[in-house]
């Protein structure tokens, strides 16, 4: 794994910098899943076969995209649907999920 290195000339004395941080900030740790993903990338780079199920896109040779989904993705792109959805979700999809949950589990929820 590649480690970032910092020179004291650029940032100052590490002990002074550390002392300027709050306890909460000093207690922060990096993302464990990103750490695992980096380790997996190293294993892959070493030539060992790996089925990577950590972060990001799955290998399409191991998990091919179904043709119906691929066709729908292409239609959506051609229609200009290239932005993130609204933060509260796509209304039609939310309604479909609510309909499913009510039908399958008898739990009605408001669309909000």
Image (cartoon, grey):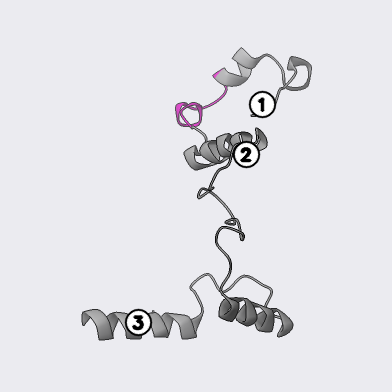
Q: Residues within 10 Å of mark 3 (few under 14, many from 20)?
A: some
Q: Quadrant of residue 13?
A: top right
Give the vertical position of 10 relative to 41 (above or below). above
**Residue at coordinates 49% horizontally, 32% vertically from top-left?**
29
Q: Residues within 10 Å of mark 1 (few under 14, many from 20)?
A: few
Give the vertical position of 66 relative to 55 (above or below). below
Among numbered discs 2 and 3, the one appearing first in the sequence: 2
Q: Quadrant of residue 35?
A: top right
Foreground of the two, 35 or 62: 62
- Pointer 1 with pointer 2, Cβ within 8 A: no
**Residue at coordinates 60% horizontally, 13% vertically from top-left?**
15
Mark 2–mark 3 Cα distance, whole angstroms, equals: 41 Å
**Residue at coordinates 65% horizontally, 32% vertically from top-left?**
46
Q: Nearer the viewer, mark 2 or mark 3?
A: 2
Point out the stretch of residues depicted in magenta. Answer: 19-28
Q: Nearer the viewer, mark 1 or mark 2?
A: 2
Residue 91 location (% of width, % of height): 48, 83
Among numbered discs 1 and 3, the one appearing first in the sequence: 1
| Residue that numbered label 2 is attached to | 44
Mark 1–mark 3 Cα distance, whole angstroms, equals: 46 Å
Among numbered discs 1 and 2, the one appearing first in the sequence: 1
Mark 1–mark 2 Cα distance, whole angstroms, equals: 18 Å
Residue 80 location (% of width, % of height): 72, 81
| Residue that numbered label 1 is attached to | 3
**Residue at coordinates 57% horizontally, 81% vertically from top-left?**
68
| Residue that numbered label 3 is attached to | 98
Q: Image check: 7 left or right of 102?
A: right
């Amino acid at each position: 794994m590649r480690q970032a290195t910092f020179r004291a000339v650029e940032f100052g004395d590490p002990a002074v910098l550390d002392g300027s941080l709050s306890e909460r900030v000093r207690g922060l740790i990096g993302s464990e899943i990103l750490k695992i993903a980096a380790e997996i990338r190293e294993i892959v780079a070493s030539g060992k076969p790996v089925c990577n199920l950590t972060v990001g896109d799955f290998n399409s040779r191991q998990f091919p995209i179904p043709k119906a989904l691929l066709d729908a993705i292409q239609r959506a792109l051609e229609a200009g649907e290239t932005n993130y959805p609204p933060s509260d979700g796509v209304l039609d999809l939310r309604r479909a999920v609510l309909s499913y949950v009510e039908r399958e589990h008898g739990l009605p929820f408001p669309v909000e």
